[in-house]
Amino acid sequence: MNEGLVVMVRGIIGFFTLLIFARFLGKQQLSQLTLFEYIMGITIGSTAATLTTDLSSSAWSHWMGLFVWTALVYLLQLLTMKYPKIMNYVNGHPELIIVNGKIMEEKMKTLRYNISDLLEQLRVNNIFDISQVEFAVLETNGQLTVLKKSQFQTVTAQDLKLDTKYTGIAHDIILNGIIIEENLKKVQLDQAWLVGELKKRNINSPVEVHLATINVAGELYIDLYRDYTSQEIH
Amino acid sequence: MKKIKKLIFPILILCVFITLMTSVSWIKQPMSEKDDVMKYVEWIEQDVKVEDWQQAKEHMDQLKKAWEIVLFRVQFSSNQERIFQIETGLALLKGDIIAQDQSLSIIELETIRNYWEQLEN
């Protein structure tokens, strides 16, 4: 028995199965996962690792484990989408930690969430003085959402009654030296125009470009592979 | 149509994996004269019963070679423990034949048969 070869084949099976199952489960960001979903993710990953290296049992038994866990996670996703009560039971619900500037100690105790966790998460939200907080909500994924008191909120263009222009989304038109024709078509431009613009900037070929984007106003942003390392960085 | 195409590829890959992982029961079956493990086990049993130890030794070598061929095919879908059990069984059988011990050889042949049946579990 060639153990190295068997582990290699099992590794390929585990890797692509995990890839397919992860795509099937959706595109939730890691930061959006609840504690339960996070633990389920770890279990599925761990099962895939065992499938690869634990040769004492057949690959099929591990693969079935992986399949069952993925199917259950998918089922739970469907149920939580359809029935909010199940979602509340499985994921919990957001909890108010600060109400009208007052810390809810009893609630924190039940959530086993201590004051240093609170201060740390406030700092993550760029708040270094707790007296600036009106409301703080501990979300189901463990993140803290903060509403500052009105006198500490950031002034917006709307507050100042300033007119602003529509910014929209910039399109990538060159990525790693390759022209993205599809995106050029979206902004009704062509390759000849792009090459002309590059020439104007003394760039001989798109291959020299690491990233080029174009915004709604038609402004080009170009980053070359060639870095100006001779300039001092402070 | 695009969605169906996107689905077909991963489903095909998963089908290949499932086939590879669950194929022990049929890939252990002989594909040529040289890899018919159970045929050699039967031949050795007959040799042992008539106490033709020279013939049993020759068939034992052929059985070992047949197992090596089958092993390469089943190693991806079977588990290590079952494979080790068969290999240990073969080593013990070889010893029993060298020692010309009829009863131990019969016991070992039955054990190998049993492990062979359980290879897909």
Image (cartoon, coloured by chain):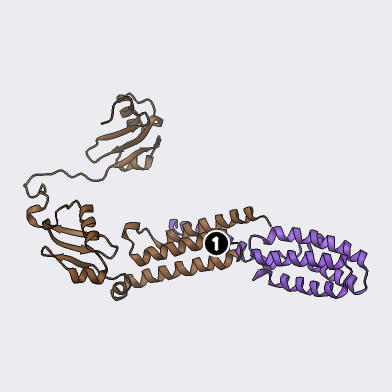
Estimate the x, y position of residue A101 in percent, counting from the top left: 11, 62
Residue at 81 percent across and 67 percent down: it is B93
Residue A29 in sight in this render: no
Estimate the x, y position of residue A62 in percent, counting from the top left: 54, 66
B18 left or right of B54 in image = left
Residue at 28 percent across and 65 percent down: it is A140
Instruction: Using the image as rendered, state which of residue B45 and residue A28 is in the foreground.
Output: B45
Give the colour of chain B. purple
Give the colour of chain A. brown
Residue at 10 percent across and 44 percent down: it is A163
Residue at 88 percent across and 63 percent down: it is B57
* Corner quadrant of residue A99: bottom left
B114 left or right of B101 in image = left
How packed mark 1 is, by other alpha carbons closer than 10 Å (few <14, some 14-19, many 20 or more), is many
Give the residue number, with chain letter if any, for mark 1.
Answer: A51
Residue A117 in sight in this render: yes
Q: Is residue A147 above or below residue A108?
A: above
Estimate the x, y position of residue A215 in percent, counting from the top left: 25, 40
Q: Is residue A13 above or below residue A163?
A: below
Instruction: Using the image as rendered, state which of residue A110 and residue A88 is in the foreground.
Output: A110
